[in-house]
């Protein structure tokens, strides 16, 4: 049986393992925390640091294939494993390019892919020299995720919040909508493209809050966004599953924000709303099967359920009532500890139209909570 390893054991790893059930595959997970969401679902769990060369190399050397559920992994170890015949999806070269926001932005520029104008800074002093470039968004080259490592700088007073490390200073985009497209590409270079989705963010946490599918945009915008995302992914020349995040600005221009080389939060709805989910699709790529069907079964709205209140052992409020709502699917990530802003689960709603679902989702947000105490 094919042995496939996953670096990282969070909720994306858990949902990837849930989708492995129909396939003949032996699953392995490497993660520091033996109580992580993916630990109980894999065939073999290894405790170790996905950022450490020795841990990743030792984990991968007896496997046939290896993939990731988070970008912050040791790429040198993956390169060595690939040179010894372990198939890494996507290729380590692409992970290296994407992992650093500076090389990722340079890739877009070199490939004439529309993206917000930017300059590169290496220190706060270099940032001060770019005062005339503001308002802009300062993004740390490596190590940021879920909005951490991103600072909006409007004027000179904000410069002290900039990063004292290699970073991208990107023009602030007047955003009308945030969009995303997931694209699968296999070793024969065939592609499968998911319908465009729209993402609405929580302005305080900078975390994906709700996601609508299909995106509520003109069909022309949808086809332009999809074509740009395809250009991004085809240029990588590597099998994989990619999520391309885009901005639609107030002038109806489409700009690429960033790409994730893995299963992604913007694709959770695909479990119920699409014929072949993003997780199923990644197994098809890993197992060299035909790509899946990306047709929409039903419009959907997905809500992230994030921790509120204090940090502590997770308490779920209002979850039991969800079971009686038709067209509602609750995914609990089974994290032991809740922290404010931590992703604890998600809800997908299916139904006739996105606007009605959005209203339903708003109603749910006041009823459901996960917090670190028995009080709401
Ligand atoms: P992360 O990789 O941590 O998710 P992003 O680069 O996606 O960080 O940025 C997080 C959020 O910050 C985006 O979803 C968007 O709302 C906002 N943002 C990022 N870049 C810009 C920009 N150039 N102009 C305006 N807002 C931006």
Image (cartoon, rainbow, N blue to C red):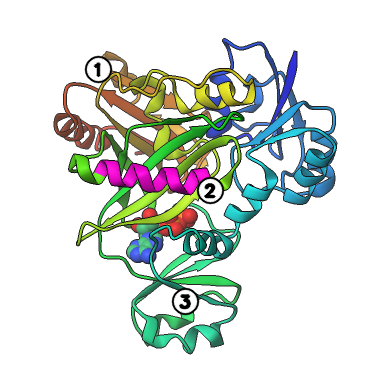
Alpha-carbon distance for marks 2 and 1? Answer: 43 Å
Q: Where is residue 205 in the image (x, y as percent from the top left)?
A: 38, 54
Crowding around mark 1 (Cα neighbors within 10 Å: few <14, some 14 to 19, many 20+) is few
CA distance for labels 3 and 1: 45 Å
Report if the CB atoms under discs 3 and 2 are less than 8 Å apart.
Answer: no
Q: Which of 68 and 324 is in front in this view?
A: 68
- From the image, tell me which residue sits under label 2: 235
Residue 86 appears left or right of 135 = right
Which of pointers 3 and 2 lies earlier in the amino acid sequence?
3
Sequence-wise first label, 2 or 1: 2
Q: For residue 285, which quarter of the picture?
A: top right
Q: Mark 1 points at which residue?
A: 325
Identify the image quadrant of the N terminus: top right
Say above or below: 318 vs 49.
above
**For discs 2 and 1, the disc positioned in front in the rendered view:** 2
- Residue 223 on image: x %, y %: 28, 41
Q: What stretch is highlighted in magenta?
A: 222-234
Disc on the earlier residue, 3 or 1: 3
């Amino acid at each position: 049986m094919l042995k496939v390893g996953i670096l990282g054991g969070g909720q994306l790893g858990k949902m990837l393992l849930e989708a492995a059930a129909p396939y003949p595959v032996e699953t392995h997970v490497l993660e520091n925390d033996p109580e992580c969401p993916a630990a109980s679902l894999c065939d073999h769990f290894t405790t170790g640091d996905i950022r450490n060369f020795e841990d990743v190399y030792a984990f991968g050397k007896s496997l046939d294939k290896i993939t990731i559920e988070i970008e912050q992994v040791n790429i040198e170890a993956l390169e060595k494993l690939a040179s010894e015949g372990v198939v890494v999806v996507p290729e380590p070269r692409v992970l290296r390019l994407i992992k650093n926001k500076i090389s990722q932005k340079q890739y877009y520029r070199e490939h004439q892919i529309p993206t917000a104008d930017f300059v590169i800074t290496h220190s706060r002093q270099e940032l001060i020299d770019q005062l005339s470039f503001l308002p802009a968004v300062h993004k740390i080259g490596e190590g940021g995720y879920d909005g951490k490592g991103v600072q909006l700088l409007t004027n000179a007073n904000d410069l002290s919040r900039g990063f004292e490390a290699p970073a991208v200073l990107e023009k602030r985009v007047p955003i009308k909508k945030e969009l995303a497209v997931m694209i699968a590409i296999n070793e024969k270079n065939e592609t499968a493209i998911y319908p465009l989705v729209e993402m609405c963010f929580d302005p305080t946490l900078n975390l994906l809050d709700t996601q609508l599918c299909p995106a509520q945009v003109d069909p022309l915008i949808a086809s332009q966004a999809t074509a740009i995302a395809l250009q991004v992914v085809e240029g990588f020349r590597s099998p994989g599953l990619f999520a391309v995040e885009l901005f639609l600005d107030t002038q109806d221009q489409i700009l690429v924000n960033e790409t994730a080389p893995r299963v992604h939060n913007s694709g959770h709805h695909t479990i119920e709303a699409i014929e072949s989910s993003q997780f199923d699709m990644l197994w098809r790529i890993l197992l060299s099967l035909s790509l899946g069907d990306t047709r929409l079964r039903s419009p959907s709205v997905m809500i992230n359920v994030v921790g509120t209140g204090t940090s502590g052992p997770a308490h779920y409020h209002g979850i039991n009532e969800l079971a009686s709502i038709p067209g509602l699917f609750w995914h609990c990530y089974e994290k032991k500890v809740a922290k404010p802003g931590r992703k604890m689960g998600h809800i997908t709603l299916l139904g006739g139209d996105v606007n009605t679902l959005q209203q339903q989702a708003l109603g749910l947000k006041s009823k459901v909570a996960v917090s670190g105490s028995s009080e709401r």
